[in-house]
Each structure stands twice: as C-alpha cells, then as structure tokens.
Image: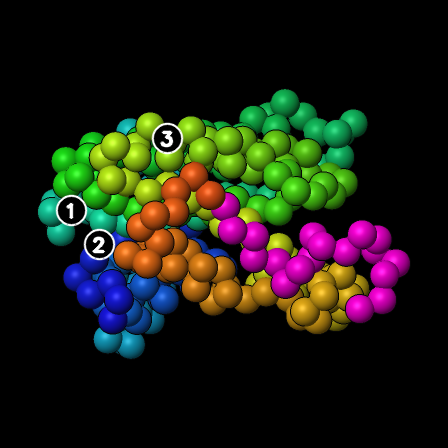
Amino acid sequence: MRFKDAVVVVTGASRGIGKGIAESFAREGAKAALVGRDEGLLAAVCAEISASGGEAFAIHADVSKQQEMEKMAQSVLSRYGKIDILCHNAGIYPCSRLESMSLGEWQKVIDINLTGTFLAVKACIPWMKQAKMGKIVITSSISGPTTAFPGFAHYAASKAGVNGFVRTCAVELAKYNINVNAVEPGTIINESVEALGEEHVSNMVRAVPLGRLGTCQDVAAAIMFLASPEASYITGQSIIIDGGQVLPESSFMEF
C-alpha cells in the first residue's frame, strides 16, 4: 500500500497502458481520478477498480482543451482536496506517410500528444506548488526520442517534444519539490497490437532481446517507482521500458 490515500490523476485511462496505471495505483491504496474521452470505457474501468476494493472516479475530458483540463483539476480538488500525482498518459498514434499526411492529421497528433501534455501539467501545477510537493510522470515513447518508424513522423515529433518538455518542466518546478519524469515504452501488447495478427506480433517479438512484448503492468511498475518516495531524488529523466528493443546494433543480429 505504497500510495495509501494518495490522489493520482491518470489521463488516457480508459484502455491500455492508462488502464493498467490506474489499476496498479488503486491496488496500492491510491484514490484514482480517471480522465478520458470515452465515458463508457471509463465507467467500466472504475467499476472494475471498485469491484477489486479500490477507489476511482471518472472525468470525461479532452486533454487538448485548456478549459477541460482546468475543470478536470477542479473536479479532483472538489472531491479530494489535493492532487499528489499526475500520470499523463493520453495520446494517439495514427499512421500516415509524410507525402499523404495532411496538416489536419499532423495538428491533431501534436494537439493531443504534445499540447495535451502541457495543458494537463499546467492545470495541476498550482495545487502541487501550494502543497510544496508533487509527482508528475508522463508517458513518452522510444519512437521519436530514440527510434523511428515509417508513417509516424507526427507521433515521433510529439514524443520527442514531450521529452524536451519534461526536462525544462523539471528545472522550473524543482524548487517546489515537484518531480517531473517520463517513461518511454517500446512495443506494448494491447488490443491494437494483437489485432495485427499472430505473424506480425511474432516479428515484433523477434526485435526484442528479452523475447517478449511488454505489458501494461511493466510500464505501470516503472511509473509507480517514479511516483514513489524512493524516486524523490530523480527528476527530468526518462526510463526506457522496451525489453532491450533499442539495443541491437542491427536488426539481423541473433539473440
């Protein structure tokens, strides 16, 4: 129960990594505010957490809208009176090659993945400053900061931007005892990945030295560490969670 009575905000909490983060914190005693755009899925996650003895409530909001992020923070404060931890996980990853990518497609990814990060953090900062403490952990990616993949120029740009944001944010907020860090997941198994088919998944597994794809719980465990007192002297950093995916010198190497 490392997080007993702590209040954690999880954006993008309706599925995948965000759901795993919310469930993991709730299991360890946190009061979880789940933020997302799909009210039905959010309600289902809250119900699962409650059925397991945890505490969670849903906030329907779009991270790319400033007013909605401000209302989100106010909702959490009205209910619990504080915000201890922000796990900003919301993001999208549509595929589009550069020559066919429209400005609208580019802008949507930047608005949600990068501007959404700024708005979610900005909404929570005043209350963490007031408490003179806080933990902010942002989900970035190996795509952009470390690797590249055709069709994801907008996604890679947004995540590289997130890493730069994390470092500057960490410097600005350090004097308020607020830690700001990120995680960079590699290929994580979820519904979208499984839908690509067994052969495709097997090919992805072959690129991972540890011989398996990551799970949402793998990512959640690293996030919980960065949000814990054990990480109180870590700020402005990013942890790669990829089973060694970025390490091989060549894709032709045999593990």
- Residues under numbered marks 2 and 1 in contact, where contact means CB atoms less than 8 Å apart: yes
Residue 183 highlighted magenta (yes or no): no
Q: How far apart are marks 2 and 1 (CA)?
A: 7 Å
Which residue shows up at 33% across the image and 43% down it?
A: 179
Residue 21, placed above or below residue 9: below
Using the image, determine if residue 34 lies above or below residue 236. Answer: below
Q: Which of marks 3 and 2 is nearer the N terminus?
A: 2
Q: Give the amino acid type for the residue marked by disc 2 in the picture.
A: Val
Expressed as whole percent of the image width and height from the top left, the position of residue 233 reads 34, 48
Farthest residue toward the bottom?
52
- The range drawn in magenta is 238-255
Residue 219 shows in this picture: yes
In the image as oriented, which residue stretches furthest toward the front? 233
Q: Which amino acid does label 1 sit on?
A: Lys
Look at the numbered disc 2 and give the secondary structure of its residue.
strand
Alpha carbon separation for disc pair 3 and 1? 23 Å
- Mark 1 lies on residue: 82
Badge number at residue 171:
3
State the residue position of label 2.
7
At x 70% / y 29%, what residue is drawn?
A: 101
Residue 85 screen position, x and y as percent: 28, 49
Q: Which of marks 3 and 2 is in front?
A: 3
Identity, as a three-letter code, of the amino acid under mark 3: Val
| Disc 1: CA contacts within 10 A as few (<14), some (14-19) or many (>=20) | some
The numbered mark, 2 or 1, whose residue comes first in the sequence reads 2
Q: Residues within 10 Å of mark 2 (few under 14, many from 20)?
A: many
Q: Is mark 1 on a helix, strand or loop?
A: loop
Q: Which image quarter holds the C terminus?
A: bottom right
Within the image, what quadrant is residue 157 found in? top right
